[in-house]
């Protein structure tokens, strides 16, 4: 079984003074999250698509699915957690409780606010996850990466040739993901930045899939303006 999990748990504080979480803001004629969900529906390889959002926004999300004619039974709305990884685990628990989890079942996790995901990236995540327990989507870093531990002076400048910028999707064997997460100490959970780091901490291999520079994450008003420009260019 292959599942998609759209991560819509964020509140969008970097968007400034807005009434809606960023995933529900309009991009062109539709909310950002609707653009994202549509790409996973188009793919056709998923047994079920989970949308994980804040508990108090579940009804709003369900109403959006109805408004845009996406409430066809292929999508379920699940409450997210207090962190990104808790949200992912909530989705995995929903799958286990409602469908059971087989040894080869895969979950493709994706930011709700990355609406320009392509079918190639989705397909390559699925195929890579059939061969590896974890897969990350990345692009080559074009700028020099500067490390500063104290935020004041440079601690290190890594070789750019070995640096990549992480995107999503991140895709996993569900059983392996849940097992490794449950083995983490509280201290290890505190330093998690994303789910792939679970595998890195446990010294497990994470395969790479090429992303796209326009597979941007919309987190600020500037990002939203850029996304509208990408949308207009794409729709020409």
Image (cartoon, rainbow, N blue to C red):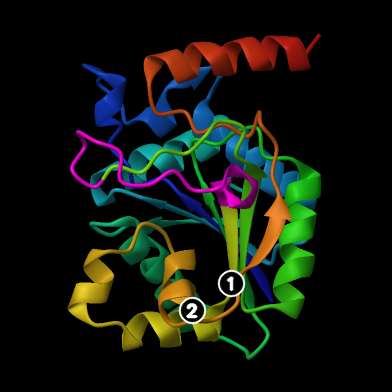
Residue 191 horizontal side relative to residue 92, left or right: left
Q: What crowding class fits label 2: few (fewer than 14 Cα within 10 Å), some (14-19), or many (20 or more)?
A: many
The image quadrant where one finds the C terminus is top right
Cβ atoms under marks 1 and 2 closer than 8 Å: yes
Q: In this view, does 110 lie above or below 22?
A: below
Which is nearer the eye, 23 or 223?
223
Q: Where is residue 85 in the image (x, y as percent from the top left)?
A: 36, 63
Give the residues in magenta: 149-168
**Which quadrant holds residue 134?**
bottom right
Residue 29 seen anywhere in this rendered image of the structure: no
Residue at the spot 43% in from the left edge and 88% down from the top edge: 179
The image quadrant where one finds the N terminus is bottom right
Q: Where is residue 112 in the image (x, y as percent from the top left)?
A: 49, 41
Which residue is under mark 2?
177
Residue at the spot 66% in from the left edge and 16% down from the top edge: 230
- Principal SS element in the magenta part? loop
Residue 43 seen anywhere in this rendered image of the structure: yes
Q: Position of residue 81 (x, y in %)?
A: 28, 59
Which residue is under mark 1?
172
Between the residue at mark 1 and the residue at mark 2, the CA separation in whole angstroms equals 6 Å
Q: What crowding class fits label 1: few (fewer than 14 Cα within 10 Å), some (14-19), or many (20 or more)?
A: many
Q: Which of marks 1 and 2 is nearer the N terminus?
A: 1
């Amino acid at each position: 079984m292959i599942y998609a999990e759209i991560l819509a748990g964020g509140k969008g504080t970097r968007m400034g003074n807005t009434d809606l979480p960023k995933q529900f803001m309009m991009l062109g004629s539709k909310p950002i999250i609707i653009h994202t969900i549509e790409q996973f529906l188009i793919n056709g390889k998923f047994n079920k698509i989970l949308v994980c959002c804040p508990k108090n926004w579940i009804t709003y999300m369900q109403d959006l699915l109805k408004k845009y004619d996406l409430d066809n039974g292929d999508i379920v709305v699940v409450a997210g957690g207090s962190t990104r990884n808790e949200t992912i685990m909530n989705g995995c628990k929903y799958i286990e409780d409602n469908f059971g989890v087989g040894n080869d079942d895969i979950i493709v996790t994706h930011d709700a606010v990355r609406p320009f995901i392509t079918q190639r990236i989705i397909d390559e995540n699925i195929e890579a996850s059939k061969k590896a327990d974890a897969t990350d989507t990345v692009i080559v870093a074009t700028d020099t990466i500067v490390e500063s531990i104290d935020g004041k002076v440079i601690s290190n400048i890594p070789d750019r040739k070995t640096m990549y910028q992480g995107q999503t999707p991140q895709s996993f064997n569900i059983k392996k993901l849940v097992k490794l997460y449950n083995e983490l100490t509280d201290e290890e959970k505190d330093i998690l930045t994303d789910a792939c780091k679970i595998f890195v901490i446990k010294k497990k291999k994470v395969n790479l899939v090429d992303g796209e520079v326009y597979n941007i994450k919309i987190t600020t008003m500037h990002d939203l303006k850029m996304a509208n420009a990408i949308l207009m260019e794409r729709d020409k």
